[in-house]
Structures are given as C-alpha cells and as structure tokens.
Image: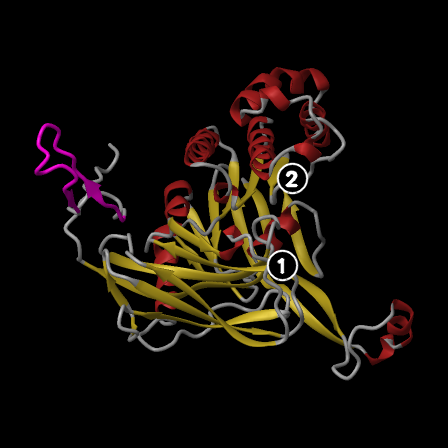
Amino acid sequence: MIDLKFDHVSKRYLIQQEDADHPAQHSLIRKLQSLRRRREDFWAVRDVSFEVERGEALGIIGHNGAGKSTILKLLANITTPTSGEITINGRLSALIEVGSGFHPELSGRENVFLSGSILGMRRAEIATKLDSIVEFAGVRQFIDTPVKRYSSGMYVRLGFAIAAHLDPDILLLDEVLAVGDAAFQAKCMQRIKELRETGTTIVFISHDLGAVERLCSRAILMHRGQIAASGSPREVIAEYQSASAQLTSSAPPKTATAILDNKAEITSLTFYDSEGHQTSAVRTGDSLTARLGYKVHEAIDDAAFELFFQSTEGGLLCHLTTELSDKRLDLTPGTGEVEFTCGEFGLLPDMYHLDATIIRRNQPPGNAIDWQYRCTALRVDPGKAIRGKFYMPHEWQITLTGSAEHSGQTATPSLEILAPT
C-alpha cells in the first residue's frame, strides 16, 4: 500500500527585491514605490514525483537549499503546492524544526495533549502515552513549565518524544539528530528503528549520511528543487559524494550551494601550513590556518562564521565558530576574510569534508545566511604517533618526589587516548 505520493509536485515562492537605486526607506515611501520592485520566481521544488510504501523509510539528502525541507513542509500541510498532487494515507506526525507545533504559553504537559488531539487521539489515549513521552524527553522536572522557557535542547527532545510516541502511521523527521547530545541522539536512533520494525512509514532528512544509510531502505538526492538520484541509500550517497568531490581540489574551492537570503555569501575556503603556503593536506599535530573569504551585500548585525569538519560518511567531528567569542561582529557591505588558526590540528589521518556558514548569533539551528555544504576537502596525513579518535594538545609535567635533583622535570610525550569500546 502507498502511504505517501508526490505526483509532479512543484512549489514556487515569489521573491520581491528592492530597486538597486532605492535602498530601504520609510515604510510609507516603500509602499508608494512598490511598483518599482522587481519580482522573481523561486522554485523550491519543481516537478517532483515519488512514492513511499507503508513501512518504508525514505531518506532525503542534498545540500541546503536543495528542496528537502520544502518537501516535508508540503507533506505536513504547512504549505501547499503550486501545482501537482500530494496523497497521504494515514495519521501523520512531524518534527520539522525546533518547537514546531508547540504553543509557547502552554506547559510541556499541555502541549503533549494538544499535539495528540491534533492527530485525532482521545484524551485518555494520550494520557497512556504521557509517562513514556516525559521519560524519553528527560523533562519531568519541567513538564508543567511553559515551553517558552525551555532551551532549544529541551524543545527538540520533547518534540521528538511527542512525534515518536503518539503512534503515527507516518513520521516526518528533519535533522532531528542535529540537536542534542550523543546520548539523546542514540535514543532517537533506537526509537526510529523500533518504529520501522512496527511498520511506521518514515521520511528522514539529515546531513548525517551514515544515519541515512543505517535507518533508511531507500533514498533520493535533491538538487536545485529536483530529484537528481533515487535508489538504495548506499547508491544515492555515493552519487552525492561523487558530485561533491568534483567541487574539491587543491585550487581555491568554488561555492557549492545557493545563497540562502542574499545578504552575504561565502566566496572561498583555503588552508595554509605553518610556513604560510597554501595546502590541501595537513599532518596530525601540525599547525593549520583556514581562511574563509566572504562578500556582504547588505549590512548584517551580530553575525558569526562557522566551519564544520565531517567524515566521508557524513558524521560531524568538529565545529569551529566565532559565536563563542564575546566580541560582537557586525558586517557591512564589501568583501572580507576570516582566519581560523589551530596550533596543533587534532583529527587523525583520513579525508574530511567541510561545511562553511554565515549565521546570526543566537539563532535556532538551520537559520543560516549562507551555508556552503561540503565546499572543500582536507586530507590529514600521519603525524604524531597516537592512537584513538583524535589528538589532544598537551604537556606532561613529572615530579619525582624524594629527589631534589630531578624535581620539576618536564616532558612532552604523546598522549594515548583509547577509543571507547
């Protein structure tokens, strides 16, 4: 039986832009000048067709702006298609973004019952699920607190717990594993596997390609609003990685995604060794400098830059961000460069892919100004002789008691970090 069907579905957004000769002015003047504005069509999804059978888990991958989240919003009826037909057979539950579906003034408990009633469940039926939802989310102490006071982590834990415990026929998940600690992510993975085994139909969006391969029975690759590949997760992921690899070389990288809101864009990402020479490889323990070029089209207040180091399987290994700095960064129109410097690079020998983003500080995950997905690659060669998951810069200080002659000796041998079993 077919639970979900997209039949030649398209979604168009109308983008309205100011005339270049008339920058932002008073709202009344802007209204009077509205006829001077140019309107452009943006097709987030264009002529997309696919089917998902009952009990199947479909993974949707692709760079940011490719149309993945728009598909889920169309399935969840958050937005309607411009053309085409969508068929849904069954009770559908969705976790598309942090806090989606929550009423901020209601408590966690009240939002559980609200979500269940929206799904058509009786109050007594919801009550039988309440304890398992609260236990899974780990918010028992705050279950009667208005959710507007919840952290983003609490939001997503409760949101996933509700979506995954109210017995949906169809479950939509968008980057649910991107928020939360490792323990919570493991719980999510286990719960998704349990739902699959009980016949729940799942549509799963994630940049964690390893999770897509483990959880999904089929995958599609989106590119510029259209399906670029469809098949087994391994085949589609290989196609995606092959396309991404064409964007990487020893030359300065080219942009890999569309600009998300036109205010700024990342123009380059290059690496330099300890002597200042441009490189595409580094040894474990050596110094490394990354220079991120950017262009600002409109002023941006309180911005931040980020780098994400990912394994070839898609797992996030390291996240560098200027957001942790206590200095405010306001960007003005023009070009510039951000430099990240690491005295002793800690990742072990392998090939790594990088994302680069421009964001506004203190915004929910995914609200990027520009996100260049897998815009370049970095090869790490053997350096310091270590074992484990990563190299941790350190020093040893050894004090030999009872011997003044040797007291205070220092040494800097390699530190062995054993991988967890």
Mark 2 or mark 1, which has the lower sequence index? 2
Task: Out of 386 and 159, give the one closest to the viewer.
Answer: 386
Picture residue at 71% right of the left edge, 61% below the top: 82
Residue 6 seen in render: no
Residue 360, which numbered label? none
Label 2 sits on residue? 99
178 left or right of 17 in image: left
Q: Position of residue 294 (x, y in %)?
A: 52, 72
- Distance between mark 2 and mark 1 Cα atoms: 23 Å
Q: Position of residue 151 (x, y in %)?
A: 61, 36
Q: Position of residue 278 (x, y in %)?
A: 31, 75
183 left or right of 275 in image: right
**Amino acid carrying mark 2 in the image:** Gly
Residue 301 seen in render: yes
Q: Where is the N terminus found, in terms of image quarters?
A: top right
Asked which colour scheme the image uses, the reply is secondary structure
Magenta stretch, main secondary structure, is loop
Q: Quadrant of residue 303?
A: bottom right
Picture residue at 64% right of the left edge, 22% below the top: 143
**Amino acid carrying mark 1 in the image:** Asp
Q: Where is the C terminus found, in terms of image quarters?
A: top left
Q: Position of residue 383 (x, y in %)?
A: 17, 57
Q: Quadrant of residue 343?
A: bottom left
Q: Which portion, as a residue range, is magenta? A: 393-411
Q: Determine if the magenta segment contains residue 231.
A: no
Tell me: residue 285, above or below residue 271.
above
Q: Quadrant of residue 230?
A: bottom left
Residue 302, which numbered label? 1
Secondary structure under tag 1 reads loop
